[in-house]
Image (cartoon, rainbow, N blue to C red):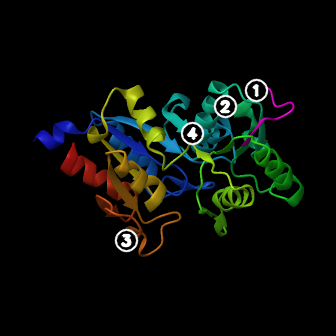
Amino acid sequence: MSGRRALRAVLVDLSGTLHIEDTAVAGAQEALSRLRQAAVAVRFVTNTTKECKRNLLERLRRLNFDLQEEEIFTSLSAARRLVEQNHQRPLLLVEDSALEDFAGLDTSNPNAVVVGLAPQHFNYQTLNTAFRLVLEGAPLVAVHKARYYQRGDGLALGPGPFVTALEYASGRSAVVVGKPQETFFTQVLSELGCSPGEAVMIGDDARDDVGGAQNAGMRGILVRTGKYRVGDESKISPGPYLTCDSFPDAVDHLLKDLL
């Protein structure tokens, strides 16, 4: 019974776990509603960088997900927080639809480089500009370093390969702010006032969602939707606390065995 009382927070990934672009994972809305009826805090943690938090919230609400903006913690907000703390003027390599989350920042005469998912801006000229800044000493901030993500038409390159290219060319290492960084998870949990041992993470990325959460002291549940591929469980050590077919199955386990 002590295990049942211990769970106080559930962190849920978005893209690939609750939805893929404009299509919801089957049964995910109803499963979220059931989870909310339990005595547990629910927060949504995402590395999505191709759109601002407001657009992401609108997309999810169109898919009939019940959530509030303050429940969403994004790697974009973590990147902004870091840049503001260091009083930097960033060159922003993010999609235009994500720029809203950096509104008000001074980006003139950049002295830092922030890289997110920016398919429309990952061209030679822009990457070379970023390379020269980093080579001259500008900090390189990776919103995250995901290798790939799931789109409606299949897997697609994430920002990780482009961040790694800049690291390789400049000989400098990026500061990563999103999942799987421990600080990303602990910042969310600190706002909830609970410890990692009292929380579970649900996501489709073995390394960034599950591995990152478990390295932070949480339990991680891997779902076989989104970017998941057979054998992903073996790519992290220790392996996932649990692997489920989908988010609804993960919720079933939580309600039956942990809450």
| Real-space Cα separation, disc 1 to disc 2, in angstroms | 9 Å
Residue bearing mark 1: 105
- The mark that comes first in sequence, 1 or 2, is 2
| Real-space Cα separation, disc 2 to disc 3, in angstroms | 35 Å
Image: magenta residue range? 106-113
C-beta proximity under 8 Å, tags 1 and 2: yes
| Real-space Cα separation, disc 4 to disc 2, in angstroms | 15 Å
Answer few, some or many: residues within 10 Å of disc 3's Cα (few below 14, many 20 plus, some between 14 and 19).
few
Q: Nearer the viewer, mark 1 or mark 2?
A: 2
- The mark that comes first in sequence, 3 or 4, is 4
Q: Give the quarter of the image for residue 147.
A: bottom right
| Real-space Cα separation, disc 3 to disc 4, in angstroms | 27 Å
246 shown above or below 37? below
Percent x, y for residue 152?
A: 64, 64
* Residue 204 in view in this figure: no
- The mark that comes first in sequence, 2 or 3, is 2
Label of residue 74 in the image: 4
Magenta span contains residue 99: no
C-beta proximity under 8 Å, tags 2 and 3: no
Residue 19 placement, left or right of 235: right
| SS under mark 2 | helix
Query: Three-letter amino acid code at disc 1?
Result: Leu
Magenta span contains residue 112: yes
| Real-space Cα separation, disc 1 to disc 4, in angstroms | 18 Å
Answer few, some or many: residues within 10 Å of disc 4's Cα (few below 14, many 20 plus, some between 14 and 19).
many
- The mark that comes first in sequence, 1 or 4, is 4
* Residue 71 in view in this figure: yes
